[in-house]
Image (spheres, rainbow, N blue to C red):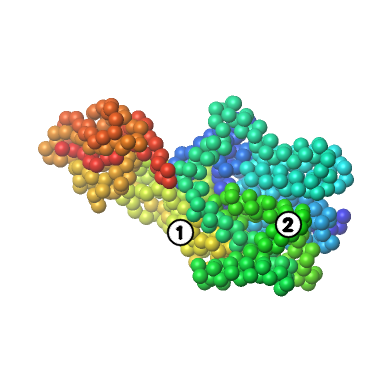
Amino acid sequence: MRQTLAIIALVILLRLPFLHQPIQGDDLDYLYGAEHAQIDPLHPLNTHYMFSGDMVDMRGHSHGPGNPWILAILLAAMGDVREVPFHLAYTLLSIIAALAMWSLARRFCERPFAATLLFIAVPAFVVNGNSFEADLPFLAFWMASVALFVKAVDDDSILALAGSAIAGAFAGLTAYQAILLTPVLAVYLFQRRRTWIPAWTVVIAAPVAIAVWQAWEWKTRGALPAAVLMGYMRSYSFNKTSNTLRSAVALVVHSGWIVSPLLVIAAFFNRNDKWRLLAASAAMLAAAFYDLNPLFWLSVGCGVLVVTWLVTESLRWDFLAAWAAIFFAGALLIFFAGSARYLLPIAAPVAILAARTAEPRWLTAGFALQMILSLGLATANYQHWDGYRQFAKTLAADAAQKRVWVDSEWGLRYYLESEGALPLSRDQLIQPGDTIVSSALAHAVTVNAPIAQVSAAEIVPSIPLRLISLSRRSAYSSAASGLLPFEISNGPVDRVRADTVVDRKPVLSYLDPKDSQAPAHILSGLFPDGWSSERASVLLKTPEKLSSVEVVLYIPPNAPARDVQLLVDGQQVAEDTFPGPGSYKLAAPLQSSNPTGTVSITVDKTFSAPGDRRNLGVIVTGIGFR
C-alpha cells in the first residue's frame, strides 16, 4: 500500500508544476470536437475546422471521439476552457496509467517499484501527459485494458475481464492504433489459457468499438470516418513512402530513449549476442553518414539494441517482448510522423524488461538521469507554448475590436480565437486595416497583401532543449524535417508577428499569374502556377480607355469545372458553360469610372490532384481589363 501511495504521490507531484500548462499542439482540434459535442453529443467530430488554411471535415481526424467526449464533459462542467481544472482532471488519467503499470510490474518483475518509476520517467509520459491531446487518455485505457486482462486470465476473474473489455473499447474510441491491442492480448491468452472463450471475445473489444462507431457515423451522418481520413491522407500526401521511412527511423531513435540510454546499455547490451551488436554497429555507422551529430547516431544505436532485444525475446515467447514488438511493428506501418508519443504503449514492457535485467544501481542512475531530462524537456515545452499565450494577450484588445486573422495553428490560434480572432484560410479576402498574426513555425497561407509590422516576438525557452524549433532538427513531435530525439540548442523555437494590412496600389490593368508583379495584385484564390480555386479575385488598375473585361482560361482534362462566372466588384458581368477541356475566353463590355476594380472568376466544381492540397478549378492564363 505504501508503494502504491508513493506512485500516486509521485504522479501528482509530476503534474503539479504544469497545471497552468497552456493549450498546445493539437489540443485545439480536440477542443473543437468538445465544443461541438455541447450541441451534438453523439457526434462530436461531425463538424469542420481550419487545418493549414483549408476547411476540413473533423470526421477525417486521426483519432476517434473518446478524447473530445472527455473534454466535452469538462467543458460542460466548467462552462469554459480552464487550464488548471482541466489538467487536474487529466492527472487522473496519468494515475490510472501508472497504477496499471504497477499492477503489471508486480506480475512480471522482481523489481516492480523500480520498473514503475522508469515508466513514470519516460519523456513522452512526462511531456505529453501535460497536454489535452489523445495520447494520455489512450495510454490510460490501453494500460488499464492490458492490466485487467492479465489479472482476469491469471485469477479467473470475470469482473476484471469486463473491466478490460470496457477499457479496450474506450481505447478503440480514442485512437485507431488500439487495434494492436487485439494481437497483444491474444498472445497472452494463447500462452496462458487459450480455451477460455469469454476472454477471446474481450480480445477484439477495441476493433469492435471502432467498427460500431464507424457504422454509427455512416448510418446517422452518411460518411465513414475512416474513409474521410484516408481521403485526407491521400490529398495531403501524408502516407508517402518517404514519410513512412522517415517515421520508421524516428521511431527507432525514440525507442532508444524510452528508458535512459545508460540503462539501455546496462540492460540490453550483451557482448555475447554478436548479431545484435553487429546490427547496432552497422546502424550507427549508417546513421553517422547521414548525420554526424552524436545525438542522432547514438540514439539509432540504442534504438536498434532495444528493438533487436524485443525481437529476440519475443521469439522466445516472452509476453512483454511480444507486446512491444507487435506494437512497434504496427507503428512502422501505421504512422507517418514518427513522434515520440506514438511509442507510449510500449513504455511499460520496455521498462519492465529493463528492470528485470539491469542491476539496481543502474536502475537508480537511469531513473534519475531520465527524470532530469524529462523535466527539462517539459519545462522547455511549457515555455514554448506560454510564449504564444503571452503574445496573444498583447493582441486581445485588437481581436475584440477589429478583424484579426490567425495564420498559425496550435496554442497561438486558440488564445487569439478566444479573444475574437478568426483562422486565416487560403482564399480569404483581406481588407486594409485587418491584422494578420503569423508564426514562422506554423504558417500555411501566403498573404499577397501589402502589410506593415505592428509587433513581433521571439520565443526562446531558457532551457537549452528543444522539442520543436525553427531549425526543425528534432523529430520529437514530427519527423517531417529532422530525426533527432530532441534538440540541444539555445535557438528560438518560433518567431511570431502581427501585421496590419495597408492599402494596395495596383499598377497592372491586365494580369498574367506568372508575372513577377502579379502577387501584389492577387487578393485570393489564384496561385502562381495559374490554377484558380473555386473563387479567384485580383485587384487591378482601371485603364483610361476601358472597353471590356476578360479572363483567358484553360480547362485541363482532369478538371471537372464547366460553368465559369466573371465578376467585377462583386457584380456578375459574364457567364458561360463550356463543353469540355480546352482553352477559352470569357469577356464582357465594361464601363467604369473607379480608379481600381476587383475582378473575380468562380467555377462550379473543383478537384484535388494527388499530392496537392489545393482545391483546383481552372488554369487562368490572363485576367483583367482591356
Q: For mark 2, does the 10 Å Cα neighbourhood hold few (<14), some (14 to 19), or many (20 or more) residues?
A: few
Mark toward the viewer: 1 or 2: 2
Residue 523 in view of the camera: no
Label 1 amino acid? Arg
Q: Which residue is located at x 88 percent, y 45 percent?
A: 155
- Left or right: 253, with 392 as reference point: right
* Residue 307 in picture, x, y percent from top left: 66, 61
Q: Can you see residue 516? A: yes
Mark 1 / mark 2, whichever is N-terminal: 2
Q: Label 2 belongs to which residue?
A: 315
Q: With respect to residue 411, does 200 lie above or below?
A: above
Write the residue at 59% across / 26% down.
Answer: 220
Q: Neighbour class for label 1 at 10 Å: few (<14), some, many (≥20)?
A: some
Rounded to the nearest angstrom, the CA distance separating label 1 from label 2 is 49 Å
Q: Is residue 39 above or below residue 510?
A: above
Please identify the quarter of the rendering in which residue 2 is found.
bottom right
Quadrant that contains the C terminus = top left
What kind of residue is marked 2? Leu
Which residue shows up at 62% across the image and 29% down it?
A: 216
Give how far across and how far down residue 536 sits, in percent: 32, 38
Name the quarter where the N terminus is drawn.
Answer: bottom right
Left or right position of 270 against 591: right
Residue 74, above or below 580? below
Is residue 296 toward the left or the right of residue 440 in the image?
right
Residue 506: x percent and y percent? 23, 46
Residues 550 and 607: in front is: 607
| Residue 495 marker | 1
Q: Is mark 1 on a helix, strand or loop?
A: strand
